[in-house]
Image (cartoon, rainbow, N blue to C red):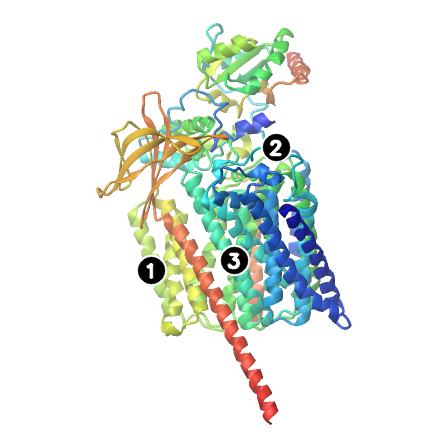
Amino acid sequence: MTRIRWTLWAPLAIFGAFVVLVGYQLTQPAQTEVESAMIGKSIPEFDLKPAFADRPGLASADLRDGQPKLLNIFASWCIPCRVEAPQLEQLRRAGAPIHGVAIRDRPEDVAAFLAQYGNPFTRIGADDLSEVQLGIGSSGVPETFVVDGEGVIRYQLIGDIRPEHVPLLLEKLQELAR
Amino acid sequence: MKLLIFLLSLCLTAPVLAQDSMPPAPYAYRQLDDPAQEAKALELMQTLRCLKCQSQSIADSDAPMAGDMRHQVRTRIAAGEEPEAIRAWLMERYGDYVSYKPQISATTWPLFAIPVLLLLVAGLVLRRRLRARS
Amino acid sequence: MIPEAGLAALWLAAALAALQFLAGGIAVHRPQGNELLASLVRPAAAIQALLTGLAFLALLYVFSVTDLSVKLVASNSHSAKPMIYKLSGAWGNHEGSMLLWVTVMALAGGGIALLERRLPERTMMATLAAQAFVGLGFYAFLLFSSNPFERLPQPAAEGMGLNPLLQDVGLAFHPPTLYFGYVGLSVAFSFAVGALLTRQVTPDFARAMRPWVLFAWIFLTLGITAGSYWAYYELGWGGWWFWDPVENASLMPWLAATALLHSVSVLAARDALRTWTIMLGVVAFSMSMVGTFLVRSGVLTSVHAFAVDPERGSFILALLALYVGSALVLFGLRAGTISEGERFAITSREGALVVNNVALSAILGIVLLGTLYPLLTEAFDVRVSVGPPYFNPVSAIFLVPMLVVLMVGPLLRWRKDSLGRVSKPVLGALVVALAALAAALILGPVEVLPAIGFMLSAGVAVASVMPLAGRNVLRLPLATWGMVLAHLGVAVSLFGMAADSAFTKEVLVAARPGDTSEVGPWTVMLDDARPVAGPNWTAMAGNMSVSYRGGDAIHVAPQARNYWSPVQSTSEVAMATRWNGQFYAMIGDEGEDGRWQLMLWWKPFVTWIWYGGLLIGLGGMLALVGRVIADLKRRDIQRRVSERRDDAEVTA
């Protein structure tokens, strides 16, 4: 008889667990971003040709030169990238080294974008096949990575850089410089 | 936030704005010459998730990033890599989310344990019901 | 005027539901002395049906004349829409579909009240009270949070609802078909609750419940079949099932309803499986409500996403917790006191149906688990994806034994039978199954699951017609024909699935006009790619001449279409259908070298998947008609017997 009792209450128990789970999830904001799983891992090997005539291309060796830096994944066709241009400029003026990776962009489009919104980049690589983007676990534009001197990814910021993110990024760079 | 959703809906109904103008990756829409390799690649692509879509495999999506992922899968299979190695490579970068085929791990073990449990419970129920009845 | 009348009708209906609930509840609790209240319950249900019907007609009216002073019409309709889509727009939105939900519930309640004569009075009161109880929550939801008749302060200049993707015949009728199914299951729920409350789980109760379950199940089967076909040709990648959360939300009630259908037949025929039937009755409608919740709340990501709103989700969750929770509590408290029914041996039809129940319930559990698992991990900030590579093999673990038992079950006698008696037909089916497997393996390399699929589809096909052997087919009850057809439909569908999995050929080619390609037995020539215009779109159409094994050329023209209001681009698939499969083509972008990206498929026997679904639905319809006719005949005989008895008493 006890066994029968147990199975009779099992559906209610399962249902209760379901209500608790979905009730909790309803209160949480929808999670639409895919985070990179490469945080704490080393940048993969790559060598991108220049995306812009006035800046050299980007290779993984450039990210292993001993200095922590920011890696900004962007594209001229990406609207939030325009929104974050002032923040990038602010970071550049504060002394943060910024390298850029242009996703699926023609040189002329990159040139037009930089002319209109400013050029905070020291180097810009052209990632026509999204290979580097896939390689570091980025899933969209714009994203900004903080990479330490040895080429290890330390932090990922998904979406455009907001004014409140600027001190955060500067702090991370300073931490890694020590 | 609206912009992010905008970009996310790039897949089956593509708004004309916010798209790149570059051609698709070489192997995004081109099959491998070896049918056996292509079959392996297709099978793998049907189980990898498009990261910018609501819920589609990269085989079914027209998003440029899905095309780039297909290019990666095909070129790697052509170079001799095993499908599971390519899946592992992608999961190393994006976590379990990118694979529609859950791998047994600390986060997914209930998915495999519960069917086994159900099998046991089903067996018990049947045994109790049918033995008692004969 | 009309919208306000509709709203008033809705309020009145809600008031009547409250009356039905209270009067019914009191009549159940204390039948003596409350005969007046009891007599109000049935009329309340009937008038409620009438009033909600009127409210729904009012909504249809405002949509048909595009009354832009109504907020719902302004957001979802457009004066330039064809009439059929204006009308289908009435239920193609949240508020309208909720109104459809309560209308079907009220119609079902009215139907039970007016047509059902087999139940003891007290059980009937309990059933109608339960139906009204559930209805009240949805009335509250509608009236307080999703009013379909809300007016705008100023009438809008034009409607906003001209989304071309939603103007499709399949999509227009997919919701009502599914809703008749989902909400029809509420009847089974109310019956189950009524039976639990009055402890009357009898064959008569099962016979009363069965036609309602059949009715709902038929609509669910057809709705899912239609939805699968719509996704196949509209979403344009040749897939027909992706285990997407919204798809699973429609499948889970169907699994429960199929198990319930079989269980209720056992209860009706043999007075066994009482607890199973009650539990499945509760679970089936619970799954309907869970499904409705999942697709509207936004907690799960889906390519079929509706307009989601967590606030609505919370309301539905509250209703869900109240109704399903209280029904399951009642089940836990009362089910133990349901006495065991008749006994039966392992090898008997009841035994086979127990296996069926257990297997379907297990598959239901797995689908639920796989659908909700990403939600669970998200609560711990981890994101996982669960898709076809998980669902297919894991559900196969339970599906395969179930189909093997299906090959034997319908041939077994009730109560006690021996495998030896049915060994000949079963062995015959097994031989055919193995032959089918061999044929498939010869035709080409086949993976494990499709191979098993071929085997089982052949075996089940043969076994499903076996019950006809040795019987006078002209005097066979319609319900038996229904069973045969439905099981045959399962086999046909399974064959289509296996053939599509195993033998689909896909060719991607960049072609210039004049180029020829081959896919499977088809030769495809791209004639040209030229622009084409429609009422609210322009497209590039790839005109192709395709021929099967060198036969006559057929002209197909897939399109890459661009709508301008709202701005959207879609892909229109072109298909050429034969009895043995479909040629399926899509056109992509033009490359820089002037070559067009073509995607061509040959999908052998893919249409059999949906033909099978239609057969299953047809089988259900035959069974329903057969049962209703048999019931009417029985009632007629009973009436005549009692009349004769009365006459005999008078003349005695």
Q: Nearer the viewer, mark 2 or mark 1?
A: 2
Q: Quadrant of the N terminus of chain A?
A: bottom right
Question: Residue beneath label 2, please?
Answer: A31
Query: CB atoms at circles 3 and 1 under 8 Å apart?
Result: no
Amino acid tagged 3: Trp
Disc 1 element: helix
Is residue C286 visible in the rendered structure shown here? no
Q: Say left or right for A69 vs C571.
A: right
Amino acid tagged 1: Val
Cα separation between marks 2 and 1: 51 Å
Residue at 61 percent of width and 90 percent of height: C649
Asked if residue C71 is positioned above or below residue A77 in the image, the reply reads: below
Q: Chain of mark 2?
A: A
Rendering coords of residue C212 (x, y %): 55, 62
Q: Chain of mark 3?
A: C
Asked if residue C352 is positioned above or below residue A88 in the image, the reply reads: below
Q: Rate crowding at label 1 as few (under 14), some (14 to 19) or many (20 or more) other CA atoms within 10 Å.
A: many
Relative depth, front residue between A81 and C52: C52
Q: Chain of mark 1?
A: C
